[in-house]
Image (cartoon, rainbow, N blue to C red):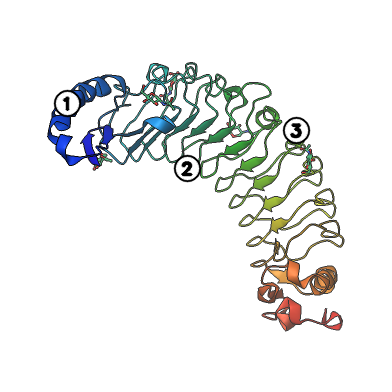
Amino acid sequence: MTQWFCGSCSLTLTHPTSSICNDTMKVFGAVLVFLAYFGHATSACPALCQCYPRRAEVVCNEVPLTVFPVESLPENTSTLTIQFTNITSISEQDLNATPRLKQLHLFSNHLNNLSSHLLRGVPLLTTLDLTGNKLSHLPAEVFSHAPLQILVLKNNLVEKADAAWLPDNSDLTWLDVSGNHLTNISGDFLQKMPHLENLDLSNNHLVKILANSLDPLIKLDRLNLQNNKLDSLDASLFESTRNLTYLFLSRNRLTYLPPNIFQKLTQLKHLSLDDNQLSSVPPGLLDHLNALEDEGLDLTANPWVCDGKMAYLLKWLQNNQKKAFLPETMICSGPQSLKGRSVMSLTETEL
Ligand SMILES: *[C@@H]1O[C@H](CO)[C@@H](O)[C@H](O)[C@H]1NC(C)=O
Ligand SMILES: *[C@@H]1O[C@H](CO)[C@@H](O)[C@H](O)[C@H]1NC(C)=O
Ligand SMILES: *[C@@H]1O[C@H](CO)[C@@H](O)[C@H](O)[C@H]1NC(C)=O
Ligand SMILES: *[C@@H]1O[C@H](CO)[C@@H](O)[C@H](O)[C@H]1NC(C)=O
Ligand SMILES: *[C@@H]1O[C@H](CO)[C@@H](O)[C@H](O)[C@H]1NC(C)=O
């Protein structure tokens, strides 16, 4: 077994007897020179990048690129990853070089703008990951020209999620706009994504989610609103999202929850409400959450006031101990006489 490596191609030859080895070597040597030349001409790979021809994948990882490596990109590339480089832009012309692209991962570069025609030359693109760039204002129609199913804009500088970015009835099932500067999210924007199953809006500055704005998202399975500035939620907010299984509301400023807000969420397995400003919950709040998994409800790190209003929650916790996450760490912050006591240690007569 002899192996020769020539940059991006490798050849493996077997020869049955060593007596013919010398002659064979000469012949194959000549063939190899030809193949090396020919191979380079047809299956080139951009300098600084790795190419995996059988998977039609190209990866440019943490290399000193400052412009998109359009030169020598294999035309049949279906997955392209350019990450931790110094490229600042990517154009429609760049992507015209790879018309069969299905996945484009552009994690942690220095992109600060996209053209509205960027995706016109990639009609098969379903996944676009722009995590960790410097995108702020994006033009209308920027995501309209490809059948995107997964769009990740995590950790950029976006202030407004604009309905004009998307086509009507977009194919998106997964949208992640976490870690941006959103202060609100419009119903017009969400309305464009009736197939959405996963929506991540965590780590923004959202103050309010408008009533009915989630109504079009009937397929929603996971909603992450963690670490925003929400101080209240509309009573009918989750009226139509009946397939929700994961709902994250931790690290907001919620002081109050409407009694029926979770009534339709009979599929909900996980609900996190930790690190808010809840002093009590209304009677009945948790009564319809029949699918909660063990440790599925997190109510820790809230300033519970252990008076009569706590009776409902105390009873629920006693009946559903396994479903709460670390219930023994839920502490009364008032009244003065019970301050510091664990909620679970209370008896009904103490309230
Ligand atoms: C892509 O093209 C290269 C070079 O023409 C070829 O070697 C490779 O097999 C092709 N890959 C696929 C998945 O078609
Ligand atoms: C990007 O540019 C900075 C500043 O010039 C440099 O320090 C860094 O090494 C570059 N990144 C890569 C991956 O080459
Ligand atoms: C971004 O690009 C669009 C279209 O090319 C252009 O209209 C817009 O002015 C650019 N915005 C910024 C902030 O550079
Ligand atoms: C939503 O936020 C954007 C950007 O900060 C702002 O321009 C717009 O007026 C806000 N809309 C509403 C309804 O608050
Ligand atoms: C909700 O989930 C059920 C079970 O997974 C599924 O059959 C149904 O189609 C879903 N509803 C919607 C609107 O997606």
Secondary structure, mark 2, is loop
Which of the marked residues, 2 or 3, is nearer the chain's N terminus? 2
The residue that label 3 is drawn on is 216
Label 3 to label 1, Cα distance in Å?
A: 68 Å
Q: Is residue 118 left or right of residue 274?
A: left
Query: Which residue corresponds to mark 2?
Result: 155
The image shows residue 19 at horizontal and vertical percentages of 15, 38
Element at label 1: helix
Mark 1 or mark 2, which is nearer the start of the sequence? 1
Disc 3 residue crowd, few under 14, some 14–19, many 20+, Cα 10 Å: some
Q: Amino acid under label 3?
A: Pro
Q: Position of residue 148 (x, y in %)?
A: 57, 28
Position of 292 with respect to 2 (left or right) is right
Residue 27's disc is 1
The relative height of residue 283 versus residue 148 in the rendered view (above or below) is below
Q: Amino acid at mark 2?
A: Asn
Residue visible at 17% across and 40% down in the picture: 18
